[in-house]
C-alpha cells in the first residue's frame, strides 16, 4: 500500500479515536453523577462525606467503564495521529459533558455556554483541517533517535529543573494563594507524560505487528516515566481542585497543559516543521478558538442568561440603552410586556439584575 495512503489512514484512525475518547469521557461524568444522585435520593452517605455506597451503584460503574474506554481510546490515538491534534481535541469532552448535563441532569446551559460549545466545535474543526497528516516517528528505534536530539534534551532538562523549583520553592510559599503554581507543575510534567504515551503507543502498535518490543529497554523506561509523571500530575491537580474553584482550574489547566504538549511535540517530533504557513496559522487559530470556547463555558456558567432575557439587555427608554445600569431579577425569568415596568425586587434600582445560580457537580 502507498505510504501516503497509510499515513492518511492512520491520521483518520487517530482522529476517530480522539473524538470517541472525548465522547466516552464526557459521558462518563454524566453516568457517575446520575449514580451519585440516585444514592443521595436513597439517603446513602455521600462520597464527599466519606461514603462508598457508590460501589454498589451500576450507573457509577458504567461511568467508570466509560471513562476507562475513553482513556484507552485516547492512549491509542497517540499511536496514529500527531499529539498536536490529539491533545487539543480533549476539549470536546468538556463540550460533551456540558451538553449532556443540560439534558440528563437538568443543569442549565446558558447563552454563553452554547456559544462556547459552538466555538469548541469550530476550533476543533479548524485544527483537524490544518493539523499535520503525516507521522515522522513510526517505530521505537526512531523514537530513541528523537530522544537523543539536543533540542529535546535541553527541553527535558528545563522541564525537570522548573518542576523542581515549582515543587520545592514556589509550591510551599505560593501554592495556597496562586492557582498557577500547581497548574504549572501539572502542565510542564504533562508535556513529558504525553511524549511517553506517544512512545508507548508506537511500541504497542509494533507489538501487534509481531515485533519483539518487550525486549526493548526504552519501552519499559517510557512506562516507568509515564507512571511517575501521571502520579505527580494527579497529586498536584487534586491539590489545585481542592483549593480553587473548578471553573477556574479547568480552563487554565487546559490552556497551559495543551500549550506545553504542543511545544514538546514541536521540539521532539518536529511536526510543525512539515506544516505550511497557513497550516500553522490555522492550527494556532483553532487552538485559540477552543480556548475562548472553554472560557465561555466555565467563566459564565453560573449566570442565568438565555435568549428570553436577551431583550432586557437591548431595551431602550427615553434615557437610552440599559447598559451600565443595575438589573433586578425577574421572577421565573418572565419578561416585561410594557415599557414602564417597575423593578420586581424590593430595593432594586432602575432596571433589572440577572439572577445568578450555581450548577456544579458534587462528587
Image (cartoon, grey):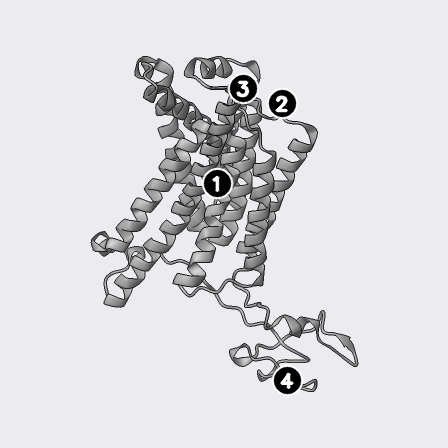
Residues at marks 1 and 2 touching, judged by CB atoms closer than 8 Å: no
The span from disc 1 to disc 2 (Cα, nearest Å) is: 31 Å
Q: Which of marks 1 and 3 is nearer the N terminus?
A: 3
Q: Name the residue under label 2.
A: 273
Judge left or right: residue 204 versus residue 270: left
Position of residue 342 measured from the top left corner of the image (x, y, whole percent): 64, 86
Q: Mark 3 points at which residue?
A: 152
Q: Which of marks 4 and 3 is nearer the N terminus?
A: 3
The span from disc 1 to disc 4 (Cα, nearest Å) is: 50 Å
Residue 165 in sight: no
- What residue do we see at 48% from left, 36% from top? 15
Say which element carries label 3: helix
**Mark 2 packing: few (<14 Cα in 10 Å), some, or many (20+)?**
few
- What residue do we see at 50% from left, 33% from top? 166
- What residue do we see at 60% from left, 72% from top? 309
Which disc number belongs to residue 171? none
For the C terminus, which image quadrant? bottom left
Q: Mark 4 points at which residue?
A: 337
Amino acid at each position: 500500500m502507498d505510504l501516503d495512503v497509510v499515513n492518511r489512514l492512520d491520521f483518520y484512525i487517530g482522529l476517530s479515536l480522539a473524538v470517541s475518547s472525548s465522547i466516552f469521557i464526557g459521558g462518563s461524568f454524566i453516568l457517575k453523577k446520575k449514580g451519585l444522585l440516585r444514592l443521595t435520593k436513597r439517603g446513602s452517605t455521600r462520597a464527599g462525606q466519606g461514603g462508598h455506597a457508590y460501589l454498589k451503584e451500576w450507573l457509577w460503574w458504567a461511568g467508570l467503564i466509560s471513562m476507562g474506554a475513553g482513556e484507552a481510546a485516547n492512549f491509542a490515538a497517540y499511536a496514529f495521529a500527531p499529539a498536536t491534534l490529539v491533545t487539543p481535541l480533549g476539549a470536546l469532552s468538556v463540550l460533551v459533558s456540558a451538553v449532556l448535563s443540560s439534558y440528563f441532569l437538568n443543569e442549565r446551559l446558558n447563552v454563553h455556554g452554547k456559544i462556547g460549545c459552538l466555538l469548541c466545535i469550530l476550533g476543533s474543526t479548524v485544527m483537524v483541517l490544518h493539523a499535520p497528516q503525516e507521522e515522522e516517528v513510526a517505530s521505537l528505534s526512531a523514537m530513541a533517535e528523537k530522544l537523543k536530539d539536543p533540542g529535546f534534551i535541553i527541553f527535558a532538562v528545563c522541564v525537570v529543573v522548573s518542576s523542581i523549583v515549582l515543587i520545592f520553592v514556589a509550591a510551599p510559599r505560593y501554592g495556597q494563594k496562586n492557582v498557577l503554581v500547581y497548574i504549572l507543575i501539572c502542565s510542564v510534567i504533562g508535556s513529558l507524560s504525553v511524549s511517553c504515551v506517544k512512545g508507548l503507543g508506537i511500541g504497542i502498535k509494533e507489538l501487534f505487528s509481531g515485533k519483539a518490543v518487550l525486549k526493548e529497554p526504552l519501552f519499559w523506561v517510557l512506562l516507568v516515566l509515564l507512571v511517575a509523571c501521571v502520579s505527580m500530575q494527579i497529586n498536584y491537580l487534586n491539590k489545585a481542585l481542592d483549593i480553587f474553584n473548578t471553573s477556574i482550574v479547568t480552563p487554565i489547566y487546559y490552556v497551559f497543559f495543551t500549550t506545553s504538549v504542543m511545544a514538546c511535540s514541536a521540539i521532539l517530533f518536529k511536526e510543525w516543521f512539515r506544516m505550511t504557513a497557513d497550516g500553522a496559522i490555522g492550527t494556532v487559530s483553532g487552538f485559540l478558538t477552543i480556548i475562548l470556547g472553554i472560557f465561555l463555558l466555565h467563566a459564565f456558567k453560573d449566570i442565568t442568561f438565555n435568549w428570553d432575557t436577551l431583550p432586557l439587555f437591548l431595551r431602550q427608554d427615553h434615557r437610552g440603552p440599559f447598559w451600565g445600569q443595575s438589573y433586578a431579577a425577574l421572577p421565573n425569568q418572565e419578561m416585561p410586556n410594557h415599557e414602564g415596568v417597575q423593578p420586581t425586587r424590593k430595593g432594586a434600582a432602575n432596571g433589572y439584575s440577572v439572577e445568578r445560580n450555581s450548577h456544579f457537580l458534587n462528587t
